[in-house]
Image: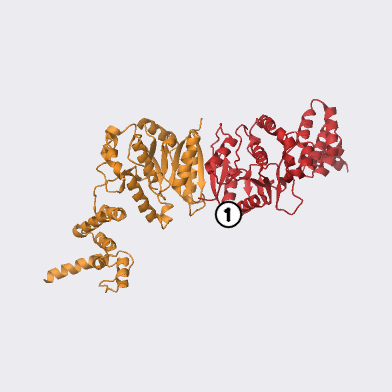
Amino acid sequence: MHKDTIVFMCTPDMRRMNARRAIGSLKATDLGRAEFYVIDNGNDPQFNHSIVMNDMLRHAERTGRNLVVLDDDVEIHEYDWLNRLYAAADDLDADIVGCVHTDDGGEVNHMGIVVGRDGLTESLYDFRHDPQWLKNHATYVPTLCSAIMLIREPRRYAIDAAYQKYFQDLDVCMQAWSQDRRVGIALDLRLIHIGGATGNRNPQAARFQSEDLHRFNTRWQACLDRLYARPELRQYDRIGRSAGWMHEYMRASRLRFVDAAAARAVYERIVAESYAPEYVAGAHFHLHGLTGDINHLVRCNEVNPCHQAARTQLEAAGVAVSRRCMNGIDCRNCFFGPQAAARSASRTA
Amino acid sequence: MKEALIAFCTPDLNRPTARRAVEAVRGTDLRRAELTILDNVYDADFHHPAVMQEMLVYAAGRPVIFMDDDAIVKQADWIDRLFATATQADAAVVGCVHTAPGGETSHTGILVHSDGTTTLSRHTARSSEPFVFAPAVSSAVMLVLNDRGLAFDRQYEKYHHDTDIGIAAWHHGARVACALDLEVIHAQADYASRVSNVGDLFARDLARFQDKWLPYIQSGLYACRELAPWKPLADAPNWDVVYNETSRLKSSDADRARRQFRSLIERCPNAWHRAGAHYHLYTLDNDREHLVKCLAENPNHQKAASLLRALDYPAVLNA
């Protein structure tokens, strides 16, 4: 069979267990139409995934092939996965196609990524897709994760090397939509994606993520009206609204790197309205970070004496700490203590 | 981004030879080079020279170390040694000493004869330099400095593209050297031995090579000062060719084959060829003495040893 595809995997060390599993599972599938490239960068501290991905995209373009990008923490257990990706691409007339990602146990962790108007992104995992846009178990999504990503017509795309580690995959999907091409997902194709096998070991990952998100938003926020005006994507425009306090708290934690004022508003709402002490305490802690008001640290300590960072900062500032807990984890004594004291005071009164 | 790229080509990453080779590379110091494995998944249209040229383009000016999947590096600092040779010899293309799995040297470079035929050579320097200049080196382990305008010629089907880039380097005024302080085990022709049309491919590629380079080989190549020591070898017969042609002649003209084998025994400096010639003479004449001489030249000649044992067995029994 003519080889029309380069399957490309990058790893810091191909001897790592997750890389061995990824390569082993892939080599057991039908690669009849593909060449398989592995780049082992030997834990190169200067390694830039975006640059390497773009080099490989150009290589695919020169050799007249399509590119499939894979992370080294995936496992593929579908023998015909590559043909399935191509079939979905054909059905959707899409240049870029991915599939459903599951955790190690098989539970879905995401099936596409939505870009929110607040500058954040949300993973889809139990979305009720509009049946109108389902085609042979495949549908359109705004963007995808590059842990598995088929890119057809590489000449149309470029991976932006300015991204340090994240969001280059979402960027290339946005490039597709901006050229009136399409991005889709095969909903009946699943692969295991552990996620963060490399990033979680990198102390700079959080910084990279926030800086790369900022770059992504700078480039694409202005295009969202046009993106969600597309009939296939209109269904996703409502995503990103609040679902619960944990969701709000996590949103605000990411938002603070993008829009500090918006993050502050969310934290203040949590402080004012939430009954979950761990989020109230955390919100106070972050408000101190945003405003410099030490009263927020005092309140954080009052609500959750287990919050070691708040206690440490108060002591460093010479403020008497009213409640000290040295457990190092959020303990039930601290959470139940104030509640019992308040009820007791109310009964006495 | 690392300084260099290792382009490791294999039809199947899971093959035992490839696994051994990858494990060996992975156990060395890779701080200077990024390991890129190209598993072509038994591509029927696979074209090694084209892929190697594509990797030069992909590397975008970075040096590329090409590796076959049956070459096993043993020295942790092998990349440093390749680069050190490139610096010391001011060479654009660098190879190393290839050994058989048993440890004996297979070759240090590719000798190009004055008639355009090629042979693997064990030529080493007489000086104390840790390298020797060579007309070309094998691409089973080959460093190509990618900023000297060198390219692999895609006209070759499978062979001689490495010899070609070596000769092209000399033609451009660059040098080719073999690092004598670096050895790799090269289970040579592991892939080629499974392909039935190797002989035809080799002959076609040799013809292309000769068409392209024969005038330069006969006029300019050995005029380079660095290659002067190779000139007598290049002007001498290509004993590989003589040996193979004479072996084929056995079935059509036995007398002529006898004469040529005897001539080879007198003139050829290579004991391996002389041993083979004695063995062939035994098959023509059934003279036990040829087996004895064959083993004297090459004690590892298994077939001669077993035939001699079989011949001598009745005598042992009678004694």
Give neighbour class at mark 1: few <14, some 14-19, many 20+ (Cα, 10 Å).
Answer: some
- Residue behind mark 1: B29
Kind of residue sitting beneath label 1: Asp
Question: Which residue, as the protein is rendered here, is positioned at the far top?
Answer: B252
Q: Work out whether residue B120 or residue A29 is closer to the camera in this orientation and state it.
A: B120
Count how many numbered circles sit on residues in the image: 1
Query: Residue B66: horizontal and vertical position, in percent?
Result: 60, 43
Relative to B247, say whether B67 is above or below: below
Query: Residue B132: horizontal and vertical position, in percent?
Result: 71, 48
Among the chains, which one is red?
A: B
Q: Work out whether residue B217 or residue B8 is closer to the camera in this orientation and state it.
A: B217
Query: Looking at the rendering, in which quadrant would you find the C terminus of chain B?
Result: top right
**Residue A29 visible in the displayed image:** no
- Quadrant in which residue A301 is drawn: bottom left
Q: In this view, does A5 lie to the left or right of B105?
A: left
Residue in the image at 64% along x and 52% along y: B87
Q: In this view, does A226 lie to the left or right of B190?
A: left
Residue in the image at 63% along x and 37% along y: B191
**Residue A136 visible in the displayed image:** yes
Query: Residue A218: horizontal and vertical position, in percent?
Result: 33, 47
The local secondary structure at tag 1 comes to loop
Relative to A263, say whether A117 is above or below: above
Q: Is residue B268 left or right of residue A221?
A: right
Among the chains, which one is orange?
A: A
